[in-house]
Each structure stands twice: as structure tokens, then as C-alpha cells.
Image (cartoon, rainbow, N blue to C red):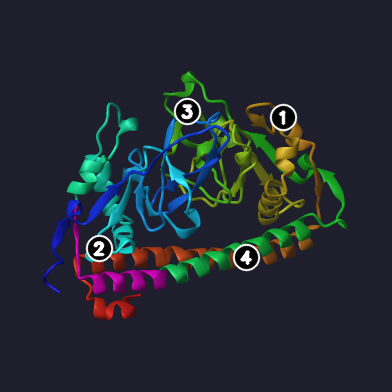
Amino acid sequence: MSNAWPHVALTELVVQRRDAVKIESGVDYRLLGVRWYGQGAFHRETVTRKTSKATTVYRVTPGQFVYNRLFAGKGAFGLVLPEFAGAFVSNEFPLFETDTEQLSAEYLNLYFQQRSVWDYVEAASTGTTASRNRWKESQLLAHHIPLPPLPVQKRIVEVIGAVDDQITALDAEAKAAHVVLRRLRAELVNDLGAPVVRADKAFEITMGRQRAPKYASGPYMTPYLRSANVGYGTLDLSDVLEMNFDPKEREVFGLAPGDVLVSEGSASQSAVGMPVMWRGELPEPICFQKTLMRYRAIEGVSVPTFVNHWCLWAYESGTFLDIAGGTNIKHITAMRAVQMPVRLPDITDQKRIAAELDTMSEVVAAIRAEAHHLRKVRAGLLSGLLDRTIDIESADLEA
């Protein structure tokens, strides 16, 4: 359709509510936060007069619209759900009620789930420093939103809700499949019937090269991976740095498809031992830093796919974390890594085990990919419904 919905300032559609409550001794106050990227309100913490620096909190009412002034540009918007009745927020979380004869709170929440809106809010936020930027209530009230008739707003909410239900179902299916995968991996990779060898007899384990100022420039600048690039079976290649690795160092620290990178240490225990298989995502040469260890199959002894699943099992079971030393920052260290016991089947069984686990991994990946695709569809559908390029009467087909 050619005509967009009329745009109306929120000051005509919502009213800010501030039900201030003074914090008293002996009373627990359940405080809400708002997750980024449109994920909504959640129970953040419970405070008392002893544990809270604030002297006043603000009571919420289910159905209110809430946002975080400090992280509005990150999509920290949501609704107060019924289960949060009796909870509170701090001063950083303004609360609003809609004029229900003009505006549905659920529709307003959908509007603020758009990345284009977050980008606008981020650019419009102000503060003394970039890290303290806030989108103030006056800015929200002055903001104009597309306003279809109330029945159409409710229909849009229903259509997007149906898509959300599908996404939720796919997420649950992926989670359940991943639980099965982890159990299967623990059963197959740690087979009690397989002979036990030291890890350095099963895999070639190499620590990456230390980063140093002398490597910041030179004739052999080479991309390298560090712990920031490695997640739980995933790679983030959006920020790959370079160091000087001469030809001999490239041979020692170079990556080949099938190598498994393991995060050697971290201040976050959940990151210690995170593994990912390198599949040649970037052209060679590419090396790795000392924050990572490289696990490589030994010809005739192990196969890369089994190495990958063994490292995933060692992370999932907490075995990597168990051997890590340190207080604030946990480190596995190469010395500890090479001494780990490995139940190592023969090559034929390794290939069979890896093939079975790879098949299950592909199932999990396919479900997650479907959910990811549906999220992209949802974003386009929502945008089209709000700017009226998609006629609400055909919304079911689009969903």
C-alpha cells in the first residue's frame, strides 16, 4: 500500500508513572532489569536496605512499558509481565502506561523491537561520555511512532506473536537436540572400554606464540586468532589481528583445516577450554596466539573429527576446567593438557563415533539455522507491517 500509517508523538499516547517506594529495613525488594535487543524485562536481583545504594525504588504494574535509559540504544525495551507483579525498578528504568483507547502496550513493545529504532535511539542518546549516554524520557515522549487503528495494532501483535511461537518452538527443539548430542558425545567419546593414553600420545598439542611489541610490525605480517575469536564450537572472525610470523614460525604456529583451537585460560570459568574446529575459514597463512592451544590429529593415531568431539566433551564435562590452575584467571597450560587421560579407540571406531556425532551436530545446526532464518523473516515482516508496505490482510501469508 502507498500510504503509511500516521505518525504520532508518544506524549499523546503514553503517561509516565513513578510509584516511589522508600527502601525500609527488613524488607526484600525484587528489582527488574531489561535485557538488550528486545528481550524484555527480567528479575535482575533482590536487594535490601543493607545491600542497596539507592534509598528509593519504583513499583511496577503488569502491562507497563519499561526501558533502560542507559542501554536504550541496545534495544533494552520491554513490558512488565504478570509474573513481575509486586516487583520494582531503579530510577534508570522509566515506566509508562498507554492510553488503551489509542495504543496497545504490546504494539508499542513491538515497535521498539526494531533494530532501525535502536540505531536511531543510539545516535540520539546523550551524556557526558559515550559509555554514559542516555535516552531520556523527554526524548521518548517526543518520539513519533506509526499508529494504525487499535484493531489493526492488535492484529499485528497476533501475527508477530504467531511467528514468535514458531521461533520459541524451534529454540526449544534445538535445545533438546543439543542435550541429546551432549549425552551421546559423553557416552561415545569417553567409552570405558577404550584404552587410556596420555593426551600427547593421542593428539599433537601446541601452545600459541606470545604476543609482544617486537611482533607488531615486520615483513611477514600474518593474521592470527586469539581467545576472543573462539567460542563454544563457533568462530568470530569480525576482528582478526595481525602479528609478524616469519616463515619458520608460520610452520610451527600455522593452522590447517581440521585443527581444533582451545581457549587456554580466562577470567570467566565458562570460557576456559572452549573449543572450535578450524575449517579453513580464512586463506592461509593464519596463526594463533598463546591464549589458545592447538589440538591436531596424529596420523595413524587419531582423526581430526574425533579430536574435535573429544575437545568438545572435555569442555562440556568440565574436564578442561578441572585441570586449570589459577585463582582469578584460570589457565589449563600445555603441561597440564598433555598429561590428561584420553580414552582412545582405534581409527576405525574413531571415524564411526565422529560420523555419528557429526550427524547429530548437523541436526542441531539445521534447527538453529531455521530459527535464525525465521528471526530474519520476523524482522522484515514487522518492518513491513509497521510501514504498511505489507498489507495486514496478507500478513498470514507472509508469516
Element type at marker 4? helix
Magenta residue span: 144-163
Please state which amino acid type lies under the numbered disc 2: Leu
Give the Cα separation between the discs numbered 4 and 3: 41 Å
Q: Looking at the picture, does residue 295 appear above or below residue 6?
A: above
Which mark lies nearer to you, 4 or 1?
4
Which residue is tagged 3?
A: 53
The nearer-to-camera label among 2 and 4 is 2
- In magenta segment, residue 161: yes
Using the image as rendered, state which of residue 126 and residue 259 is in the foreground: 126
Disc 4/disc 1 C-alpha distance (Å): 33 Å
Disc 4 residue type (three-letter): Ala
Query: Would residue 272 appear left or right of 390 to someone viewing this image?
Result: right
Residue at image x 27%, y 30%? 127
Q: Nearer the viewer, mark 4 or mark 3?
A: 3
Q: Main secondary structure of the magenta part?
A: helix
Task: Return the residue at label 4.
Answer: 176
| Residue hosting label 1 | 325
In front of the other: 197 or 174: 174
Q: Which of the marked residues, 2 or 3, is nearer the chain's N terminus?
A: 3
The kind of residue on which mark 3 rests is Lys
321 sits left or right of 388 in the view: right
Considering only order in the chain, which callout, 1 or 3, is on the residue closer to the N terminus? 3
Q: Is residue 265 visible?
A: yes
* Residue holding disc 2: 103
Q: Are marks 4 and 1 in contact (CB under 8 Å)?
A: no
Single out the residue that lies furthest toward the top: 214
CA gap between label 2 and label 4 equals 38 Å
| Residue 317 coordinates in the image, percent (x, y) | 72, 49
Sequence order check, earlier mark of 4 and 3 = 3
Q: Is residue 325 above or below residue 125?
A: above
Earlier residue among tags 2 and 4? 2
